[in-house]
Amino acid sequence: MSAEVAIQKFSFPFSCAARPSQQDEVTQKGCVRVKALELHDLQESPVLSKPSSGPVIVAPVHKKHQERPAAAPGGDVAAAQVLVCTKASQSALLSGRSVFEKLSVENEDQRPAAKRQLSCESAAKTISVVKKSAVRKEAEEQRHLKPKTHLGQKVTPHVAATGRRKRRKDLFINTEVFHRVDAHVIRAGAELKEKCVYDVKTIVQSITQGVRTELERLRAIWLWLCHNIEYDVSGYLGRSEKLSSPEEVIAAGRGVCCGYASLCTEMCREVGIECQEVPGHSKGIGYRQGQSLNNVKSDHLWNAVLLGGQWFLLDACWGAGRVDMEHESFVKRFDEFYFLTDPEEFIESHFPDEEKWQLLETPIPLEEFERRVFKTSAFFTMGLRLIQPHHFHVVTDGGEANVSLGFSRPATFTYEITQHQDLLHCGASEQKDSGNSSFGLLTVSHRNMKLQLLPPASGTYDLKVFARPEAAVTALTWVCSFTVECQTPRAREEIPENPFLSWGLQPVVGSLGITGSSQGSEVAEVEDGLFELVLKTSRPLMLLCELVHLELEAAVAKRCLATQIQPDALTCHVLCSLRGFYRLSVFVRDYEKTEVKFQNAANILLHCKGKVVGLDELFPPNLGSVCGPGTRTSEAGLSKFSHTTALVSTQQGKCNITFHNQRDLELHTVLSREEKKTAATPLSRHLFCTYTDSKVTVSASLPEAGVYRLGLYARTAPGGDFNPMCDFVLRNSCDQPGPPFPCVYSAWRKGCVLFEPRVGLLEPLSWVRFRVRVPGAQRVSVVGETRTDLKLNKSRVWEGEVSSGNGLQQLKLAASSGESSDMAVLMSFDIKQLEREA
């Protein structure tokens, strides 16, 4: 230790000692102070009166006018202050005389060892005698004054004159009101540290310069403590001497809890704020959840201050930061919560030795404090409330434990479950970036969070719940803790990990444009391997989905999803090919904002325990993200679809899909399925399109049972590429093969309609009836071995019968328009070939 530091360290108790004024008598370290109004023309004469141990008494002439000063809490005797004011005129005094005498009061000090002990003679008692007329006059005046509340009075300590205790929010709406004070304190604190100023009085004068109220003076002191004093981890661990006196704490810039509390008391005294040191138990470093604190020496010290006749609680030690026991270091983290904390919230982590310092209407016993769920400051600042359970120790019922929290403002949650450790502040860090547990089902609804916990094996576990405001992008913060005892685990299938924190709709879905869901936050039981999720939307959205099963390959999982995007709804069709639990995650963004990233909107837990879908029944490969008619088709002018869903089933192997093409777009259709074997006829021959006016009919004749993809494309700009409009999933349960359609050529245009034959494979040696409408045609013929002209009937339909011949392979339908004699082929028909005899 350098000479300079040594001089500073050991000279402070003398250089900074309080100096008694004419009105104040200060005993050791200013711990007991008696104030009396100095009255002129009064004569003092001793009066022998020695009280026993107990509160300081003011001897009255009338019982109604007895005044009791604040009594220091038994666990931490702080300065006891008595103020006796006599405002009567000299004519009201007895013979112009008044008697003042100082008497000793027994006062036991239970501060830490570093504190000086106070003897029973160090307290004082003052007796004032006045005329009855003056007493009556003063009593009348007091009826119109707001009474000052002191500990030690028979009335409830925390009841104000109005009958209602002031809360923190009654003193200030939010801490922004201290912006000017805080900025000054931080700036002044840095300057004082740079100049090596350690004198309490000088520091207080500097940081309170320019403040306007008692509340602002207290704020300046508390903020300076939080920002300039670090917790003495080395002293706490016993590796160095604990610093507790104000001078030592300032010089070193560190201290344990009693150092913070003692310095706070000294600084408050400098600005005339009555401050008490309150000893008790806390749920901080070293606390074992569930441990009995009965007959255990208290381990923490904090402060109570008197503002406006009412006591308030604060803890600068906890407001400055936290201790990282893993690295045995102090982590600065300013916490506003511990400045004038409401007693109902303070009692969750701080239990004073004396009951009256709880400042509660109904104080709680020590056993209740031990059983209560541990809640961090974030629990209260986020507006959370505990629904169940009410005590920290939870025993599973049937292998399941349930935790539920309520909230007034939207929040995001996750949890962590680990093997039990003795110390509360060990294990998981205070913040998490994401969830990583699959031992439960966490769901968040409009106003509460529910966690269904399923421990994997018998034993005792620590459960930590994390949360953050919905709009925040920071890590999730630890808000409360439980101990879970599992006697018999439930036999269950493993749940896939959910990296998106909670199940069900995410709390942010309202801002994302989602207004409702067909599935709640509970587990969705899947029947027959099929599940459908519908999300209602307030504006057009884009949709992406992810399906996860612990044994499902990613390529197969893609074939289990089909999504439909409509202006007011999003639909996801799911196929379950395996039994067990699935995670279905939904991501959305605004439809037109292609530069915006997709955000997680919902995570649905599916449970399939019955029939599953076979691999040959999965959705076809290369299925687009937009299935069925919806936003994209509407924008292109395609409307009035005969099938409004993405899935189309047929038991005959045939179906027709119709819609209106209002903008007369050039269309293209594609039929595909999982490749199995080379087909005799291309799949393209199993689709046939007919255009009449604005109506379009797409006919399908499927070659065999199975699942097919029907893709619809449109050229939205002249000369541009064909863009995907939507896909349909065609599920055919008919075993009979559907015949192909004729092969169509470019001359087959809008307005052309084929009535007969509707198949492209004709029987040989037969007469085939042709009926066709070709607008603008002057001549329509069927060409085989010879040319057969069709006749135009009154309905403007060309018709006639044509022989398929013997050994003929193909018939062609052709037409000529205008005066030209050239004929263009519209379509061709194949003819089955007879098997030749050997």
Image (spheres, rainbow, N blue to C red):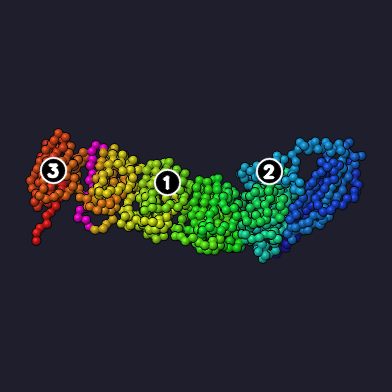
In three-dimensional space, the C-alpha distance between marks 1 and 3, rounded to whole angstroms, equals 52 Å
Q: Nearer the viewer, mark 2 or mark 1?
A: 1
Q: Amino acid at mark 3?
A: Arg
Q: Is residue 114 magenta?
A: no
| The furthest residue to the bottom | 239
Label 1, on which residue? 518
Question: Residue 780: which quarter of the image?
Answer: top left
Task: Please provide percent x and percent y for residue 453.
Answer: 51, 57
| Residue located 24% across and 53% down the image | 735
Quadrant where the N terminus sits is bottom right
Disc 2 or 3, which lies upstream in sequence?
A: 2
Dot 3: few (<14), some (14–19), or many (≥20) neighbours within 10 Å?
few
Q: Secondary structure at mark 1?
A: loop
Say left or right for 716 vs 821. right
Q: Amino acid at mark 1?
A: Ser
In the image, residue 65 sits, relative to residue 443, either above or below, namely above
Task: Please provide percent x and percent y for residue 837.
Answer: 9, 59
Examine the rendering and report whether any part of residue 745 can be seen: no
| The furthest residue to the front | 398
Disc 2 or 1, which lies upstream in sequence?
A: 2
Label 2, on which residue? 165
In three-dimensional space, the C-alpha distance between marks 2 and 1, rounded to whole angstroms, equals 47 Å
Label 3, on which residue? 769
Q: Secondary structure at mark 3?
A: strand
Report the front residue among 33 and 152. 152
Magenta residues, as a range?
Answer: 678-694
